[in-house]
Amino acid sequence: MIESGRRYRARKPRRGDLPIATIAELAGVSPPTVSKVLNGRSGVGEQTRQRVEALLRDHGYRRRPDGGLMHSIEVVFHQMLPAIAMEILRGVQEVASTDDCAVGFTDVRPRMRAGLPWVEPLLLRQPTAVITVCSLVTAEHSEKFAASGIPFVVIDPVGDLFPTPTVGSNNWSGALAATRHLLDLGHRRIGVLTGPVKDLSARARLDGFRAALDYAGVPFDRKLERCGFFTFEDGQDLGGDLLALSEPPTAVVCGNDLQALGLYAAAHQAGLRIPHDLSVVGFDDIDQAAWLAPPLTTVRQPFAEMGATAARLALTLADGRPLPQERYELGTALVVRGSTAPPR
C-alpha cells in the first residue's frame, strides 16, 4: 500500500482508535499481551484472553470476514530506491504469506517533508507488526511502538536503537573484500568515498576499507578520503575532487553504487577510462550496476533476505516469543565485473 498521495484529515474518534496501551491498562495486562490476543498468538491464559477480547470487541477492533483476526505487516520506507524496496518487500512477502499475513507498504517521505508525524497513523491501523527501512528512525519512535504493543523491527538502522531488533548486512566484511580485491590486483593508491559519519553502515564500510589496507601493510593517505552522502551527486563531486589531485588514486572504493555512478561521470569528464585509468568498486549491487559500461564491480547486499529476516523477527515477537539477539547481520558477496583491473 503506497501512501505517497494520501492525506489524513482531522476527524472525530471512532471505534478501534483506542490505543493498545489503553486497552492493556483497562485489562490490567501489558501492551504486548494485548497485541498477542489481537493477533491470535499463543502464550496468554484463557481468562486473560477472554477479558482482553471483550475489551477489543467493545472498542471496535476489526476481524476478518471468516471471523479470524486480521494479520498485517506494515513496511515503512523513506527515500529508498524502488529496486531495493521491491527486493525487501519480496522477502517480507515470502515469510508473511506462510503465516496468512498481509503486507502493507507506506512511503512516509511526503508526511516527513510536510513536517507531519508518521508513527501515529500506523498506530491507528493497529498492524500485527511494523518493519521500517527509514534512516530517520529514532529511539522515541521505537518507544511509541513498544508502548502500543506493536512489534517493531528496523532494517539497516543509522544509529544504535537497542533494544529494538535490527537487521543489516555485514558492511565491514563487504568493504574489506572490496578493498582486498583492489589490493590483489596491485593497487596501492586507493581512494574511498564514504557516507555520513553518523551512519553505522558508512562507518563500518570505512573501517573495513582501512582494515584491508592495514592487513596489507599499505599506509592510508587521508588525502584520498572524501565524506558525503550516498548520492550520485556526491559521487560525482567528491570523486571529481579525488581525480583532480596532483597524485590521484588508481582505484576508488565507493560507499554505495549511486556514488559509483557519480564517479563514472566524473571520470568521463576528466577523460579517464574505467578500468584502464581508474578502477571503481561500489556497494549494494543495484540493477544499474550490471548495466553500466563497463559493468560495475560491487558488493551485493542480500536485500530480499534482509526483508525475510525482519519479517520472521516481527512475527516471532508478535507470537510473544523472545528473540535470542537484537542485532542480525547477514553476509555480503563481492561481485566482480568489468570496472576493476590492475593499475597501469
Image: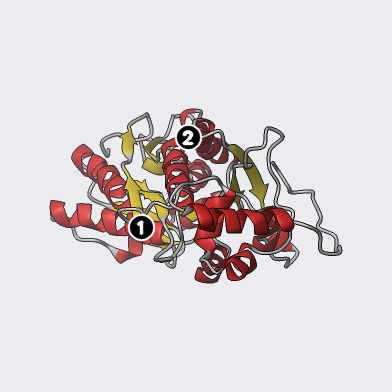
Q: Residue at x 50, y 60 (%)?
A: 32
Q: Where is residue 56? Give x, y as percent.
A: 67, 56
244 on left or right of 133: left
> In the picture, which quadrant includes the N terminus?
top right
Q: Which quarter of the picture shows residue 100?
A: top right
Q: Which numbered marker is on residue 97?
A: none
Residue for badge 1: 326
- Secondary structure category for the residue under label 2: helix
Visible residue check, residue 37: yes
Q: Where is residue 203? Give x, y as percent.
A: 36, 61
Q: Nearer the viewer, residue 85 or 161?
A: 161
Q: Where is residue 340? Give x, y as percent.
A: 33, 35
Which colour scheme appears in the figure?
A: secondary structure
Q: Nearer the viewer, residue 105 or 276?
A: 105
- Secondary structure category for the residue under label 1: loop
Q: Which numbered marker is on residue 95?
A: 2
Q: Earlier in the sequence, mark 2 or mark 1?
A: 2
81 on left or right of 273: right
Neighbours of disc 2 within 10 Å: few (<14), some (14-19), many (20+): some
> In the picture, which quadrant includes the C terminus?
top left
The residue furthest front is 47
Q: Residue at x 31, y 42 (%)?
A: 331
Visible residue check, residue 133: no
Q: Residue at x 78, y 57 (%)?
A: 15
> How many numbered callouts?
2
- Amino acid, disc 1: Glu
Neighbours of disc 1 within 10 Å: few (<14), some (14-19), many (20+): some
- Amino acid, disc 2: Val
Q: Where is residue 191? Give x, y as percent.
A: 34, 54
Q: Are marks 2 and 1 in contact (CB under 8 Å)?
A: no
Question: Gap between marks 2 and 1, in whole Å?
Answer: 19 Å
